[in-house]
Every structure is written in C-alpha cells, then in structure tokens.
Amino acid sequence: MAELVEVPAPPHDAVLGQIAELRRIAIVPALNEEETVGRVIDELRAFDPGFDIVVVDDGSTDRTAGIAADRGAHVLRLPFNLGIGGAVQTGYRFAFEHGYDIAVQVDGDGQHDPTQLPAILAPVVAGQADLCVGSRFASGSGYQSSFTRRLGIRLFALVVSAVVRQKVTDTTSGFRAVNRKGIALFAADYPHDYPEVEATIMCVKHKLRLLEVPVEMRERGGGASSITALRSIYYMTKVLLAIFVGLFRRYAVPLEKEHRR
C-alpha cells in the first residue's frame, strides 16, 4: 500500500548506525553523464563510505564509464542504449546476484541529493516499508521541473492513487530505497521506457509496502533531459496506456535464490 509519510528526516548518524551491518549498494543509471557522474559518486561516498556503488552505463558515447571507474565504482556497460528501465533492472540484478540487503537508486545527472538519503532509508531499515520513494511534491519546495512535466506527474499521481487506492504524489521519482524483497522483485521484472509509474503499481500488486517521504531535488547538473514538451505529451499518453495494461499484466515472480559473495 502507498502512503505519504511527512516526518522530519532522521539524523544522518542515526541512519548510518542502523545500516552499518547491512550490505548496501547505490544503483546509478547514467546516459552521457560525464559532467555529473563523478560528483554523484563523491557525494554518495561522503554520505556513507560503506555504500558500494554500481554505475550502469546505458550505452553512453562520452566518458561516463571511464569517470565512474576512475572513482572506484562498479561499472556495468550496456552494449547499446536499453532505456532507463533496462538500465535500472540491470543494477537491481547486480544487487540481487551479489547478495545486497538494501539498495538506493540515484540518478546520474545530479538531481538527487545524497544528503536526503536518511529520509528514504529510515522507513526501510526500520521495517516500515519495502520501498520508500522520495517525493518532490510532498513539501512543496525545491526543484519542481517544468510546468509540462509537473502537470504530467500530477496527472499520473491522481490516476495511480485511484488504482492503488492510496495517495501517491510523485510516481515518476527515481530517488528510492528498497530492501531485499524489493531488490528481488525489480531484479526479476522492471518496466522499460518510462518505468517508475508502472513500477509503483507493480509493487502494490506484489503486496510490497510502499511509502513516500518528502525530499528536495536539484536541477540536473549537466547534459540535457530527453523529455521535451512534445515528448512529454507522448510520454503522458504512453504511460497512461501502460497503467491500463498494467492492471491486467501478469508480472514475473520475484527472484528467490540467495546469492552471497
């Protein structure tokens, strides 16, 4: 079930203490993010040096993979561009196969601020949620993107809230944390193209506990978004169709076999 939790973010040190004994990984999907991926990795290490980091290079034509490797991250180079869904699922598959207990998803463009991670990690490590999503609309402050994209996000939120019968506010946020159950689900099956909206419905259909918490996001640190105003209209149409199809789709069963290094 989805629920919006508006509580103060827990102290940084408190969260680090809670996750200290857990195997944890940050999944960073990236496409031509040479301007920002190094800073994202540095910020994740500053938050918690114990986080492993896997950068999934989704067919980049620039130095994204090289910069990530130079920073000491695991780098998975896809032979061609699979899209955000394929890149994210690759990261979750890596997390599952290597036995991680908890994973966070952080975009490679710098919009997601790792200092906000305590807010999305706390409900997961406390056993209150299997998936916790950072919502940029819960607090009404911070970077809110373009008007067209905000309109689409709010439309998706209304539709998805009606489908799952719980309030959700930011169904396109890729800033999230999951436990082992969530890792197993997303490793087995993750929607492609524009996946976050359908992934929300998929979680509820698999009876994962889903929470949203308020976060602030930043403007992308470099590069350009692939979603223009015209593509936003196409995006809204396609995602609404995906929501409808998702109501009848049979999703893959989450992976169960344990993998430990």
Image (tube, helix red, strand yellow):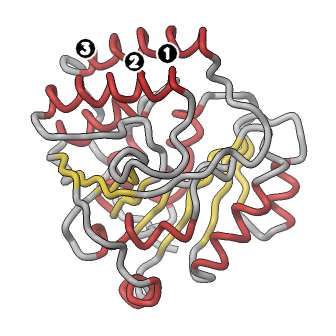
Q: Position of residue 245 (x, y in %)?
A: 27, 14
Element marked by disc 3 = helix
SS at circle 1: helix
Q: State which tag comes first along the sequence, 2 or 3.
A: 2
**Mark 3: few/some/many CA within 10 Å (<14, 14-19, 20+):** few
**Residue assigned mark 1:** 235
Q: x, y percentage for residue 241?
A: 34, 10
Q: Please say if the residues under marks 2 and 1 sit with CB atoms less than 8 Å apart.
A: yes
**Looking at this view, is 2 or 60 the one in front?**
2
**What residue is at 41 percent from the left and 9 percent from the top?**
237
Q: Residues within 10 Å of mark 2 (few under 14, many from 20)?
A: many
Which of 169 and 49 lies nearest the eye of the viewer? 169
**Nearer to us in this view, 37 or 245:** 37
* Residue that numbered label 2 is attached to: 239
- Give the residue pinned by disc 3: 244
- Element at badge 2? helix
Q: Amino acid at mark 3?
A: Phe
Query: The disc labelled 1 sits on which kind of residue?
Result: Tyr
User: Which of disc 1 and disc 3 is earlier in sequence?
Assistant: 1
Amino acid type, mark 2: Val
User: Which residue corresponds to the image point at 81% horizontal and 68% vertical from the top-left?
Assistant: 71
